[in-house]
Image: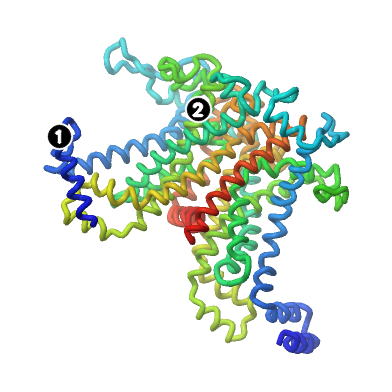
Amino acid sequence: MTAETNNESTRESLRSGPLISVMRRIENLSETQYAYLLLTPVFVLLGIVALYPLLRTFELSLFETSLNQATQKFVGFDNYVQLFTGQKDRWLPGSSTFLPTEFSFDAMISSALVVTIIFSVVAVAFETIIGLGQALVLDQDFAGRRWVRAAIIIPWAVPIIIQGMIFFLMFHPSIGFLVEPLSNLGVLAERNTLNDPASALFIVTVADIWKTSAFMALLILAGLQSIDRNLYEVAKVAGASKWQQFRLITFPLILPTIGIAVLFRSVQAMRIYGLIDTVSGCEVVPSLSCMVVTTFLTRQGTSAAIAFVTAGIIGIAVSAIIYQQYREGV
Amino acid sequence: MATDQFSDSDERAETEGGPLERWTQQAIRNPERVYRALFYAAMIFFMVTTLFPFYWLLVLALTPQNRLLEGTFLPEVDLFGPAVTFPLPVPKGFNPAAFVEVFQQVPFHQFMLNSFALAVTTTIIVLFIASLAGYVFGRLEFPGRGVLMLGILAISYFPPAAFVIPLFEAFTGNVPVTLPFTEVALFTPPRLLNTPGSMVIPFSALFLPLSIFILTTFYSQIPDGLEDAARVEGTSRIGALFRVIMPLSAPGVATAAILTFISVYNEYFFSSIMATSTEAANWSPIVGGILSYQTQYTTQFNLMAAASIVGVLPVVILVIIAQERIVSGLTAGALKE
């Protein structure tokens, strides 16, 4: 059949311009061929910006590159071994490490992997709780709902550089009015607040919660609004209080939504870079992405190894989520 | 079954004593008022916490530079007697000139224009590619559909740091791009650092998946009959996509456009690495603009605050106008798949 139609199309294309002949040829493609044809730009773009860089990063991580990047020496998995065992190359710029050198608070929060995990867990936990609160408020009907919703979403849309600047100014020791009360409470260091690893990690976490709770709220709100309202009518007739309605209807029904949102948000939080760079600098709070950037001009092999490990961790997490979704038949 | 659960928990609530019980009883007597009060308290709390940082920026921007550096520039208020004073966050002095100086010290409008140009270019590229892909995923059945879609989703969650080293290397334009794990040199790319290309290419890939998911959702909702009718009338396959499907899902296309625009305007990672100089002439977006107050005029906090307010205005306006689209787009993009 295809042979026939092809013949016909070539005969017809002789009568028309080259554009028409291309159109004819597209008309005669099978649905699968047509699908892959339309997807070509996606493949090209993601191939250039994602697939090639990922493979190349892995390749670079197997080499030790000299400071001026003139020579490369193949070292196999040495860069990885050094990251995880901490030999001569354990110390990275800013006295930060990939893994903690000892079991102490200071060593923990100067190591990239631990800092990234602490940040993600704490930030996402608070974002979920605050986001749930915001979603419950936005789910109500009240005058001026539009404005309240806009106000709650705005932080989500604030550019990272401005988000960083806001919190840099809010916690700057010489002008930030929150520094003194909070350092009296022992939450922040009194001097050099933004250069103290624990204080800076606290500020960065607060800044992230401020910005991203709204994102969580929107996802949870979608879950809330998909709940069948009749359930509440039934509950009311049965005499359930609002709290019982929340505990027995709302919460169980939005739990799957919250679960997925938490997982995706955690994966996003693991990528933290810009906020740290603007608020405190990557030397103070060395997240995984931070470390890739601080090392990549001077120690390319190490940098590539950290980048690939980060990609690996996130890749595994995302595959797990996707597999779960896939099994549930979404 | 549901009613059983309710009566069950009623019994439990009755056996519980203490303030919770008293509170519950009060709520039972007049539940609506209590919930209304709780609701307003929560709403005000969220409004204050989300909007206060902007107010703080305004305080800093309006306070004259010399007052800011005096030390504690905030007036102390002793509401509970002189022993307990606390700083009241209101500007000490009034100096709106900071908003003019922002543009005099640094060509901030050029940084913003750069951001706009980058965002618009990226949006156009993303919409074109994502329209084709959204059509494929939303309306066609073909082998590999599920796997491909999940693969694209996975890529969108990878950290930019995983891609940056080779991209930076390539955009520097010094060495040829080689096939990974071989010595085969393909071509030497032009030097793209400090040009729009070095940012638009990674941005497009980064924000493409979200638009694909939004458009897939919208395109799949268009009835087959409309497309078939157009095909019977003699439109080509691609013609049907651009003349029938895309116009019918204009709301979806607008949603994808707004979200891509905001995402690019938001972006920090590639913006700060690929625009290596904080000169507006080198295509540096607002990231560079705001950082240049930090590097050159370290102590000019009022200008940093004023520039932040100016820089945030476009997205504030966009959010107020297009909030419905943003909400639907984010939820469709993040949870549907």
Residue B177, image x, y percentages: 83, 48
**How many badges with numbers are in the image?**
2
Q: Which residue is drawn at 26% across and 58% down?
A: A231
Relative to B30, say whether A284 is above or below.
Answer: above
For badge 2, the amino acid type reads Ile
Residue A186, image x, y percentages: 44, 16
Instruction: Kindly indicate the quadrant of the structure image that contains residue B82.
Output: top left
Q: Which of B24 and B189 is in front in this view?
A: B24
Q: Which chain does the numbered disc 1 sit on? A: B
Label 1's element? Answer: helix
For badge 1, the amino acid type reads Arg
Instruction: Kindly indicate the quadrant of the structure image that contains residue A38.
Output: bottom right
Other residues around mark 2 within 10 Å, as few (<14) / some (14–19) / many (≥20)? many
Label 2's element? Answer: helix
Mark 1 sits on what residue? B22
Q: Residue at x 57, y 58 (%)?
A: B211
